[in-house]
Amino acid sequence: MTDECVEAGRLGELLQPIIDGHGGDPGMLVQILREAQEVLGYLPAAALTAIARAVGLPRARVEGVAGFYSFLHLQPVGRYRVLFSDNITDHMLGSVELMDRLCNRLWIERGKVSEDGLVSVDTTSCTGLCDQGPALLVNGRAMTRMSAERIDRISEMIRAELPLDDWPREYFRIEDNIRRRDALLNTCWPAGEALRAALARGPEAMLAEMRTSNLRGRGGAGFTTYIKWESARRAPCRGEPPERYIVCNADEGEPGTFKDRVLLSSYTDLLFDGMSVAGFTIGATRGLLYLRGEYAYLLPALRENLARRRRDGLLGKALCGQDGVCFDIEIHVGAGAYVCGEESALLESLEGKRGVPRIRPPFPVTVGYRGQPTVVNNVETLCKAALIAVNGGAWFAGLGTKQSTGTKLLSISGDVEMPGIYDYPFGVSVAQVLNECGAGNAQAVQISGPSGTCLGMHEFSRHVAFEDVPTAGAFMVFGAHRDMFEVARNFAHFFAHESCGFCTPCRVGTSLVANCMDKIAEGHGSQYDINEIFKIHRLLHVASHCGLGQSACNPLFDTLNKFRPAYERRLRSLDFEPAFDLDQALAAARQMTGRDDPAAHFGLAARVPGVST
Amino acid sequence: MTQQSILLDGLPVPFEEGQTIMDAAMAAEIFIPHLCHHPEFKPQGSCKLCTVKASGRYVSACTMPARDGMEVENNSPDFNDKRRTMLQMLFVEGNHFCPSCEKSGNCMLQALAYELEMLSPHFNQFYPNRPLDASHPQVLLDFNRCILCELCVRASRDVDGKHVFSLSGRGITKHLIVNAESGRLADTDFSLTDKAAHVCPVGVILEKRKGFAVPIGQRRYDVDPIGMQVERLAHRTTTEEEI
């Protein structure tokens, strides 16, 4: 995994099977880069050149793609690469202190590789294990329930260079934590049940059931699924060979959301049934599952399931013995980019490009993956489509509310007694959910993650539904003792880290806002900074290219309106304070000269001996 | 068939099928501020300076197809205020020191800052570290001034057929790269005759030994403000950019 691999001849030898495995297809670039990195440890410049030549792309294109994704590295990384999940719920469980502890034990600085190339420790965006945090990834494998003891043990195992396979199994155990079952989680059908039901109904009737069901997308936007399916079914195929696609969006990146993780691991057949039903209904023969890089550990089980379905005649040619009905599914793995949850950015990533949202219109239902009509649906949406295939649209429409039919999975984390997955009919009140998950002293709930809504106590009577409080599933609870300013600051940094950088307002604005929040946190804030945040919020809302930028300031806007004292008690003055602190700027000079007398200070500290700022 | 038109700030502006709001406005000599748009290349809508409100939705004028009867709000204090903020963002994101820049007077970023009455950068500077690339015998690359408009990327890819430029990184660390393992322009097949050599709206791609052929004070935007040059902007070609 070190320099000897970079040797030119050997490089070609190592890369060739990977490139051949993908038929040298430039559209598979992200997959090729991921696999090349697994072999090489990182992506050295010579490897990018070799890959570019092999797939027939300009080298700069390949470097541009490799530079976009958080999990692809152009510089050497540690042989053990530890990434702490940076979500606020992990912070609340002590992840910041645990990361410092690990860094101290290993004698390394955060974000830097140790000099012997053994280990690096850093943070990564939410890993979707908020119900069993603090969580981390080590060389891409998820570890849960970190504690001081576990961290100490991990530092010993890293120093002893113990292979990951010999680490305690217990550390890698991931629970489903299903706490409340309803229409979706109660199902325990044999594989293929929903597919057989749909085949029996026929595509037209299946589409009619979808219409009756009024199912809306579970990924956040809440677009009516039937309209997507209908539009893609009618859209003309353009390419050669003509093709339609079903894409399952399993890029569950919204911090605080982990319902898809459970569906992918314990309701796999229901999901693949749902994809097959969708494929049969719109006339697609290929399905693609875009799995977020953080969930790569689910890959072996998912692939095994696909192989079993092929053996059982549930995938491939002649589905369930019906001639002319064919459908197959392949899995693409992401490489660490929240923005790829946006459907057009996801398609770009599937095509092996930088995950930048496309200009819409045209929408994916007419011009999608490789220019063909494509339906992009969330994992939970496709599982619900499988339910509708079996039980019918009317049954589904009878659940939930009129505008928000069916049930919704909530991923509950934070200050609750029983974090985990809850299946509720739409229309349930926030107060009821809080009551049932054991949130005794909640002061706020962040619904649908950072890009969603923050509700204060006076709003707990509101209902989870598209017509009231819409959600993609995240439900993070903050107890009375939590500092809502720190919650908002965490979210501001999340968006700055995940902005794709395509458009000016989001690229620069998210970083400006994160800096503003840091300035306030350091005690240099004033009313001026709060006004700045509002101003940038208004700009991002209007001028950003996609939903990420448009909603990037929502959590700040909500918390500023509802928890203003959390900000104001940090403000130094209500007028203006510069970010630059003259006295602080002298700290380095003081340290070098060993002085700390009043004459070595500016401002208040200069007048009061012994008081440093 | 009657002429189709949009209503731009209350004024009927005709358009042909397939034209964007930007195309229609430019043809009518109405100025919509822009940086990443160039009539010779495929629009991409990333600078967001041309953000307008069309039929109640906020869109980029350069990518939004015009539709008959569409009401478009463009030149209003609110939009110009937002555009000024985005210009300020671009100024603090890179390292822009107009008095010492040899593109001063020919730079669209500077011209728009005057046009939209930007008086200060307002935000704290990021002061990114962006080393120059002086490797090429004829051309200097000063990445400090890059506004990530991707015009050079598009020109090299779509017209020159060379792919000399590309973008890497993400978010605030997004940056321009060249097509060479060494990362040096001299090691690419770039040439001064490429379209990409003449398309930069700011001062990144500079021809060596020509910096002050036209003295500051007599340059394009020294003579007339950018808002008065719509006809030239609408018909500009990359060969003319050298002046």
Image (cartoon, rainbow, N blue to C red):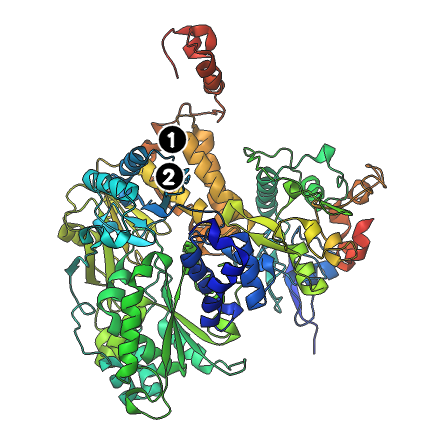
Let me know if marks 2 and 1 both belong to one chain: yes
Chain where mark 2 sits: A
The residue carrying pointer 1 sits among few (fewer than 14), some (14 to 19) or many (20 or more) residues within 10 Å by Cα, namely some
Q: Which one is earlier in the sequence, the residue at label 2 or at label 1?
A: 2
Q: Secondary structure at mark 1?
A: helix
A567 to the left or right of B158 = left
B135 to the left or right of A125 = right
Report x, y in % for residue A360: 52, 65
Report x, y in % for residue B193: 79, 57
A469 to the left or right of A539 = left
Report x, y in % for residue A482: 25, 37
* Residue shown at 63% from the left, 37% from the top: B95
Do tag 2 and tag 1 residues touch (Cβ < 8 Å)?
Answer: yes
The residue carrying pointer 2 sits among few (fewer than 14), some (14 to 19) or many (20 or more) residues within 10 Å by Cα, namely many
* B56 or A372, nearer to the observer: A372
* A331 or A403, nearer to the observer: A331
* A496 or A240, nearer to the observer: A240
Q: How many marks?
A: 2
Report x, y in % for residue A4: 47, 52
Q: Quadrant of residue B140?
A: top right
* Disc 1: which residue: A521
Q: Amino acid at mark 1?
A: Ala
* Residue shown at 45% from the left, 74% from the top: A374
Q: Amino acid at mark 2?
A: Arg
- Tell me, yes or no, if residue A128 can be seen here: no
* Disc 2: which residue: A489
* B26 or B126, nearer to the observer: B126
